[in-house]
Image (cartoon, helix red, strand yellow):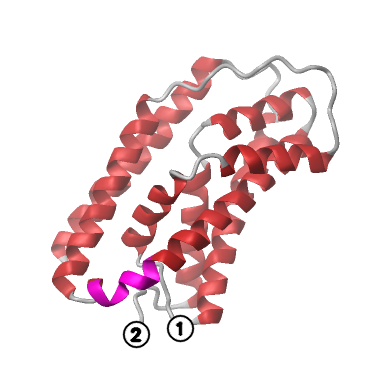
C-alpha cells in the first residue's frame, strides 16, 4: 500500500523542499523574531532562530504524517482521493488568503544582550512549537503533494529530511539577504512580503485544484 505521487528521488526531494519553504515563509511571530535578531545581533543569531523553528516544524510534520497513515485505506479510493486533494487545495487557498491579509506584529526592542546561539535556537523552537495549528498546513500540503509513504521507511525519511532542508534553506537565505539591507526593514515591507507569499500560495492552490479536477 502506498500513497505517493513522486516517481523519482529527485521529485520527492523537491516536493519536500517546497513544503519546508511554504511552511516557513510567512512572516509570523518566529519570522519577525528572526528578522529582528538578524538585524540587531547578526546573521547566525537569526539563522539559528530559524533552525529552532525548523525542528519544531519537523516534529509537527512527523505527527501529521503519522496521523495520516491511519486514514490511507479510506482515501485510496480514487474518488475519495480527489475530494481529499480538493480539500487540501481549499485549505491552502484559505492559508494563502490568511497570509495575504495578516499584518506582522511589531517586534520588541532588543535589550542589547545577544545570548548564546543555543538560547536563540531554543526560543525559536518554543515559539513555533506553541502553534500546533501548523499541522493543518502540513495536512493541506501533504494532501496536495501526496506525501505520505507508509511502509517505505527510507523514502519517508528522505521526504521529511527534505522538508527540514527546505525550511533551513529558507532561513539561511532570509538571514543572508537581510544582512545585505543597509537600513532596518520596515513593517510595510514585511506586510508586502506576506501579501506576496499569500498570493503565490493562493495561485498554487488554485492551480492544484484545476489539476486535481483534470486528473
Please say if 28 is above or below 91: above
Asked if disc 1 and disc 2 are in contact, CB closer than 8 Å, the reply is yes
Tell which of 24 and 211 is nearer to you. 24
The percent coordinates of residue 48 (x first, y second) are 73, 43
The percent coordinates of residue 152 (x first, y second) are 48, 82
Please report the residue visible at 26 percent of the width from the left and 51 percent of the height from the top: 89
Which comes before the other along the chain, label 1 or label 2? 2
Label disc, if present, on residue 73 of the rendered structure: none
Quarter of the figure with residue 41: top right
Query: What residue does disc 1 label?
Result: 151
Please say if 65 is above or below 188: below
The percent coordinates of residue 145 (x first, y second) are 36, 63
Q: Residues within 10 Å of mark 1 (few under 14, many from 20)?
A: few
The percent coordinates of residue 16 (x first, y second) are 49, 62
Is residue 22 inside the magenta stretch? no
Seen in the image, is 106 located left or right of residue 125?
A: left
Seen in the image, is 82 located left or right of residue 133?
A: left
Per the image, label 1 sits on a secondary structure element best described as loop
Quarter of the figure with residue 128: top right
Where, quadrant-wise, is the N terminus in this rendering?
A: bottom left
Please say if 3 is above or below 129: below
Q: Residues within 10 Å of mark 2 (few under 14, many from 20)?
A: few
Label disc, if present, on residue 1 of the rendered structure: 2
Stretch of the chain drawn in magenta? 68-74
Tell which of 159 and 132 is nearer to you. 132
Tell which of 96 and 64 is nearer to you. 64
* Cα gap from disc 1 to disc 2, whole angstroms: 8 Å
Please say if 69 is above or below 115: below
Please report the residue visible at 32 percent of the width from the left and 59 percent of the height from the top: 144
Quarter of the figure with residue 84: bottom left
Please report the residue visible at 52 percent of the width from the left and 31 percent of the height from the top: 27
Badge count: 2
Amino acid at each position: 500500500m502506498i500513497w505517493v505521487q513522486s516517481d523519482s528521488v529527485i521529485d520527492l526531494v523537491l516536493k519536500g523542499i517546497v513544503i519546508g519553504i511554504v511552511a516557513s515563509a510567512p512572516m509570523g511571530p518566529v519570522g519577525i523574531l528572526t528578522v529582528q535578531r538578524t538585524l540587531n545581533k547578526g546573521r547566525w543569531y537569526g539563522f539559528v532562530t530559524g533552525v529552532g523553528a525548523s525542528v519544531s516544524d519537523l516534529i509537527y510534520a512527523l505527527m501529521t504524517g503519522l496521523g495520516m497513515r491511519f486514514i490511507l485505506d479510506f482515501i485510496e479510493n480514487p474518488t475519495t482521493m480527489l475530494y481529499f486533494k480538493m480539500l487540501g487545495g481549499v485549505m491552502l487557498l484559505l492559508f494563502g488568503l490568511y497570509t495575504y491579509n495578516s499584518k506582522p506584529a511589531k517586534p520588541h526592542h532588543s535589550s542589547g544582550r545577544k545570548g548564546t546561539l543555543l538560547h536563540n535556537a531554543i526560543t525559536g523552537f518554543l515559539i513555533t512549537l506553541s502553534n500546533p495549528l501548523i499541522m493543518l498546513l502540513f495536512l493541506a500540503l501533504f494532501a496536495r503533494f501526496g506525501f505520505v509513504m507508509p511502509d517505505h521507511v527510507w523514502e519517508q525519511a528522505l521526504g521529511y529530511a527534505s522538508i527540514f532542508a527546505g525550511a533551513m534553506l529558507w532561513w539561511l537565505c532570509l538571514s543572508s539577504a537581510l544582512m545585505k539591507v543597509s537600513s532596518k526593514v520596515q513593517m510595510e515591507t514585511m506586510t508586502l512580503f506576506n501579501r506576496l507569499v499569500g498570493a503565490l500560495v493562493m495561485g498554487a492552490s488554485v492551480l492544484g485544484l484545476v489539476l486535481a479536477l483534470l486528473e
